[in-house]
Image (tube, grey):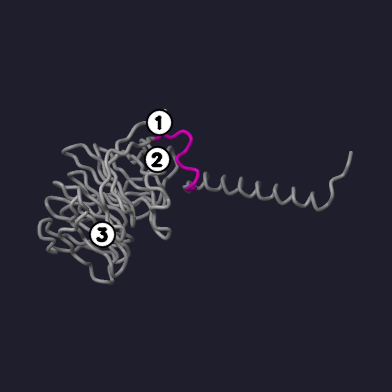
Amino acid sequence: MMKRPKSEQGIYRKIFNLIFLEAVLLIIFLEEGISAGPLFPPVDAVVYGYRIIQTYPHDPKAFTQGLIYRDGFLFESTGINGKSTLRKVRLTTGEVVLQHHLPKKYFGEGLTEFEDRLIQLTWKSNLAFVYDRISFKLVKAFSFEGEGWGLTQDGNRLIMSDGSAELRILDPKTFKELHRISVLHGKTPISDLNELEFVKGEIFANRWQTDQILRIDSNSGKINGWIDLKGLLPKKGQDASAGVLNGIAYDEVSDRLFVTGKFWPKVFEISLHRRP
């Protein structure tokens, strides 16, 4: 039998070592419950695709962090220090009809409404601001521990994400944390939960830096399904530095779902369908 040259043996040894290293890292990810981005959605996941119903203009300079829909308007929280805003935007035209600028030291994050008040998180300032929805007049502020990412409400509770695999449940009147929900696929915690929206009894959560939205049971934290929005906005239409999916709004009256992203030029109205 012909013996392979030492140089060729070295190449095969390097390939074997790389494969072995990747296998070891995969085992560590799975055993420690760390979400390995490219591996998701898991092979046993219920996955939903989408169909574009309509598109609407969106400010391509808006670093979208939070989004809700009310009465023909989008209310939007944008980020970046010195550029963070709270906005009221006409859905059909993208026109900003009312805007509040946050002080430069604050980085705007998640947004929701509760009893005609808008509640806007900040990222690392440990503060949230409460505004009158009509005038954007600041009503109060409250503090919280850790980072602020996404925010929504189910009519009785505020639901907040902080980038971890847990969702915080807050009292909407006192803003005190009541408890937390662990978000799990099987027994695996799924982290990087960002923008949130409450849709028909489920929490829709954008997974940061991915084209995925999770459908989460609002009581147990179990993931009911994964929405795959890959290809919704072609890469050539995204900002290379930060143009990721981030923005979910639901029109409860007309049963419409809207999504957008950071620096995206469009808001998409979509319908979902389960993939076989």
The answer to whether marks 1 and 2 mark residues whose Cβ atoms lie closer than 8 Å is: yes
**Residue at mark 1 to residue at mark 2: CA–CA distance:** 10 Å
Q: Any mark on residue 228, and which?
A: 2
Which residue, as the protein is rendered here, is positioned at the far bottom? Answer: 104
| Marks 2 and 3, the one that precedes in the sequence | 3
Residue labelled with disc 1: 275
Which residue, as the protein is rendered here, is positioned at the far left? Answer: 134
Residue 138 % position (x, y): 14, 64
**Residue at mark 1 to residue at mark 3: CA–CA distance:** 35 Å
Residue 147 % position (x, y): 33, 60
Q: Any mark on residue 121, and which?
A: 3
Residue 22 % position (x, y): 61, 48
Residue 271 % position (x, y): 29, 36
Secondary element type, mark 1: loop
Classed neighbour count for the residue bearing mark 2: other residues with Cα under 10 Å, few (<14), some (14–19), many (≥20)? some
Image quadrant in which the N terminus is located: top right
Mark 3: which amino acid? Answer: Leu
Mark 1: which amino acid? Answer: Arg
- Residue at point 29%, 66% (across, down): 125
